[in-house]
């Protein structure tokens, strides 16, 4: 394990350029770029690998949704980790998450999974909304357990297409990289591919049937049903659970990833896996890319990760007062609006030293 960490620092920057950077661009700019359809832009977009550039040329109208998917994934990551020492912050628009992604940690595993999931989500919806030339509504088969008198065939999210395109696009970078069997790099590639797949499958498995009632005066004698993506928060919650139970892996002599602790069940294709221990997220460290927790807000009374004790890693905290403005004394006016007053309140806040 320690050796693996050592190697990872010696590597050239693995994620200096990632398709994640598409999520950092302004979406309006992105759509303008692709509506104009100027070919050279695919080669100018930062962060795409050779294979991804090819896909960009072939499927220009898809790129905006890749960007949206990346953005959705990044936002969800920041929500899920908002009370943690590592809060999924992005550092700039070229390396997006900074050097911490060079370490094959649980946090890196989560980030790959949630961004791959974001792409499946965005693509599947874009198909349903008719935004893409190569796909439309879902053509998923009618579920066997759907009551016989309910109609199947509303326009559903095209999760099959979303899954397939996300797989081809997101995995392209890993598939292009060739490294000696047994090397640290090859372990990272296997880890990334595994976590990308776990993210995609989570979206796939959480999608469900949604129905709408028809019939005389809302009698609901008739129903039309279709396949629908789950709310992305559910995907984030599910992946966060997988993060908590992620499996530590190592390369075996045949160049395959195997669980370090062989007493546990092997992880499935839907579980997250990692190969390196997490770096110390307490203190800023240029070489690991950790931003540290100095200056982070913490909760004085919480005993959880957001509590000052854990968040500040025992360094202590400073207290200051801030003015918070809230909507208050809201009244409903006939008809139909709500009018509120603004109330200000002075609250104590705590930040890590
Ligand atoms: C990063 O984004 C900022 C503002 O959006 C932009 O001015 C800058 O050129 C970008 N940097 C790179 C390297 O893309
Ligand atoms: C940064 O992290 C590396 C790797 O864990 C460690 O060897 C080094 O001492 C750290 N530097 C500081 C300033 O904490
Ligand atoms: C996340 O942590 C970094 C470093 O401690 C901090 O600069 C940033 O403001 C935090 N982001 C949020 C949303 O709290
Ligand atoms: C701080 O933590 C306590 C205990 O978990 C919780 O009840 C409270 O709402 C938290 N305060 C803030 C501002 O989040």
Image (spheres, rainbow, N blue to C red):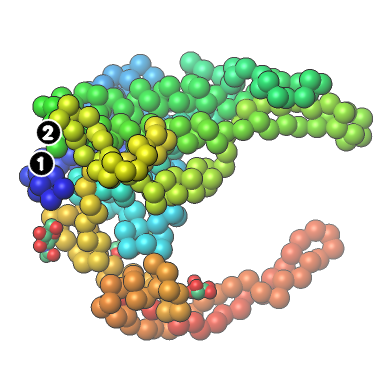
Residue drawn at point x = 35 percent, y = 46 percent:
246
| Left or right side of 192 for 64 | right
Residue at the spot of label 2: 183
Looking at the picture, tell me which residue is in the foreground, 322 or 281. Answer: 281
Looking at the picture, does residue 70 appear above or below residue 41? Answer: below
Asked if disc 2 is less than 8 Å from ligand 2, the answer is no
**Any mark on residue 44, and which?**
none
**Any mark on residue 11, and which?**
1
Q: Earlier in the sequence, mark 1 or mark 2?
A: 1
| Left or right side of 33 for 156 | right
Q: Position of residue 257 (x, y in %)?
A: 24, 34
| Left or right side of 132 for 307 | left
Looking at the picture, tell me which residue is in the foreground, 268 or 151. Answer: 268
Residue drawn at point x = 42 percent, y = 79 percent:
300
Looking at the picture, does residue 153 appear above or below residue 190? Answer: above
**Mark 1 to mark 2 CA distance (whole Å):** 11 Å
Q: Position of residue 263 (x, y in %)?
A: 32, 43
Residue drawn at point x = 43 percent, y = 49 percent:
240
């Amino acid at each position: 394990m320690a050796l693996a960490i050592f190697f990872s620092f010696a590597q050239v920057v693995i994620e200096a350029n990632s398709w994640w950077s598409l999520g950092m661009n302004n979406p309006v700019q992105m759509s303008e770029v692709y509506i104009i359809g100027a070919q050279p832009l695919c080669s100018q977009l930062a962060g795409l690998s050779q294979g991804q550039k090819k896909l960009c040329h072939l499927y220009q109208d898809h790129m905006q949704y890749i960007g949206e998917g990346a953005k959705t994934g990044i936002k969800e990551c920041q929500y899920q980790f908002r009370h943690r020492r590592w809060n999924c912050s992005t550092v700039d628009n070229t390396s997006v998450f900074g050097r911490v992604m060079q370490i094959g940690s649980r946090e890196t595993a989560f980030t790959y999974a949630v961004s791959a999931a974001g792409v499946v989500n965005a693509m599947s919806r874009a198909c349903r909304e008719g935004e893409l030339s190569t796909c439309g509504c879902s053509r998923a088969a009618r579920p066997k357990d759907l009551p016989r008198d309910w109609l199947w065939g509303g326009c559903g999210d095209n999760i099959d297409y979303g899954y397939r395109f996300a797989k081809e696009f997101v995995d392209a970078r890993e598939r292009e990289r060739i490294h000696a069997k047994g090397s640290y790099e090859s372990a990272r590639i296997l880890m990334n591919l595994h976590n990308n797949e776990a993210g995609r499958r989570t979206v796939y498995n959480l999608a469900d049937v949604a129905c709408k009632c028809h019939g005389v005066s809302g009698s609901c004698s008739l129903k039309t049903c279709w396949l629908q993506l789950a709310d992305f928060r559910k995907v984030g919650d599910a992946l966060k659970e997988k993060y908590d139970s992620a499996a530590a892996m190592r390369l075996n002599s045949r160049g395959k990833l195997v669980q370090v602790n062989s007493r546990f069940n092997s992880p499935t294709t839907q579980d997250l896996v990692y190969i390196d221990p997490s770096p110390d997220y307490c203190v800023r460290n240029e070489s690991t890319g950790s931003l540290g927790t100095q200056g982070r807000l913490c909760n004085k009374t919480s005993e959880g990760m957001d509590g000052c004790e854990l968040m500040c890693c025992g360094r202590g905290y400073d207290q200051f007062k801030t003015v918070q403005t809230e909507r208050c004394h809201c009244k409903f006016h006939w008809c139909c609006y709500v009018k509120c007053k603004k109330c200000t309140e002075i609250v104590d806040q705590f930040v890590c030293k």
